[in-house]
Image: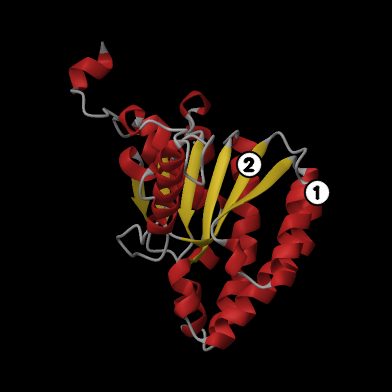
């Protein structure tokens, strides 16, 4: 039985998040510049995006560029921004064909004007997609997101439109950049690093974490299927006992 055939569609995670790591090291091992790794990673993005849509995953969030990534060498950042814009232009038709809606989470105001323009055009062109949401985390960090949510809540409390005594976990979640999206049930990180790197700090509270040594440019559908099968063999208790779950 193939890995895909082992997947129980009735227990498919609605939301999968991915930390796409290892592009630079993948390129370095091949004697290539780091940007070559980022360029090669586009095939993995396309394949995993389409595979998730085919399976019936509702949301796929890809950690594409963190707030910390702005500290990388200027040439690499410029190359990434250019590549991102080109990818928006080239992949829009594929997203439309597969009825996938693009959305972006992050502090995109810091990004180049032309890149933001191409992102917004793709968001507009794909807004009718109903099969899956592809959420790109760009210029994003979990601490940035929580700080922004706290600022909004404080402003509403100061204006008298929000009673601090009524603040709950749900009201905090409603002020996050991912408001309206379910929390990821499964987080996948490539390249062998065993950390979440300031990604979806609130949302990953009860996510299952899956780590693979493969670099992102080598990650393919079979690797995704393996991660999902692994996830489906875990017991998700949310603080309860096994006995309570099986009742």
List the residue tagged with mark 1.
125
Q: Position of residue 79 (x, y in %)?
A: 63, 80
Quarter of the image where the C terminus is located: top left
On the picture, is 161 further left or further right than 208?
Answer: right
Task: Give the residue at x 53% y 54%.
Answer: 62
Among all residues in the image, which is located at the extreme front? 159
Are circles 2 and 1 on residues that touch, CB within 8 Å? no
Residue 98 falls left or right of residue 215: right
Q: Residue at x 62, y 81 (%)?
A: 78
- Determine which residue is flagged by label 2: 133
Tell me: residue 70, above or below residue 216.
Answer: below
The label on residue 50 is none
- Considering only vertical position in the picture, is 175 above or below 88? above
Of marks 2 and 1, which one's residue comes earlier in the chain?
Answer: 1
Give the quadrant of residue 143: bottom left
**Residue at x 52% of width, y 27% of height:** 9
Secondary-structure class at tag 2: strand
Residue 43 appearing in the image: yes
What is the distance, in whole Å, between disc 2 and disc 1 at their CAs?
13 Å
Q: Residue 24's spot in the image, x, y percent?
A: 49, 78
Residue 172 coordinates in the image, percent (x, y): 40, 38
In depth, the one of 166 and 174 nearer the eye is: 166
Q: Secondary structure at mark 1?
A: helix
Q: Is residue 185 visible?
A: no
x, y (%) of residue 14? 51, 33
Residue lying at 20% horizontally and 22% vertically, measured from the top left: 242
Q: Residues within 10 Å of mark 2 (few under 14, many from 20)?
A: many
């Amino acid at each position: 039985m193939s890995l895909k055939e082992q997947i129980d569609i009735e227990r498919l995670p609605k939301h999968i998040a991915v930390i796409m790591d290892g592009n630079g090291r993948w390129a370095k091992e091949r004697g290539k510049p780091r940007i070559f790794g980022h360029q090669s990673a586009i095939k993995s993005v396309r394949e995993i995006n389409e595979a998730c849509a085919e399976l019936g995953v509702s949301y796929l969030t890809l950690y594409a560029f963190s707030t910390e990534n702005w500290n990388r060498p200027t040439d690499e950042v410029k190359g990434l921004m250019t590549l991102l814009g080109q990818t928006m232009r080239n992949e829009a038709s594929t997203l439309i064909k597969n009825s996938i809606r693009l959305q972006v989470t992050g502090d995109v105001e810091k990004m180049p004007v032309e890149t933001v323009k191409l992102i917004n055009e793709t968001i507009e062109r794909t807004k009718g997609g109903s099969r899956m949401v592809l959420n790109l985390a760009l210029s994003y960090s979990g601490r940035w997101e929580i700080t922004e949510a706290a600022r909004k809540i404080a402003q509403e409390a100061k204006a008298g439109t929000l009673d601090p005594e009524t603040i709950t976990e749900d009201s905090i979640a409603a002020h996050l950049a991912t408001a309206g999206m379910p929390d990821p049930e499964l987080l996948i990180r490539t390249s062998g690093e065993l950390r979440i790197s300031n990604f979806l700090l609130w949302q990953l509270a009860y996510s299952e974490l899956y780590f693979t040594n493969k670099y992102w440019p080598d990650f393919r559908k079979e690797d995704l299927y393996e991660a999902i099968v692994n996830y489906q063999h875990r017991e998700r208790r949310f603080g309860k006992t096994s006995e309570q779950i099986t009742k």
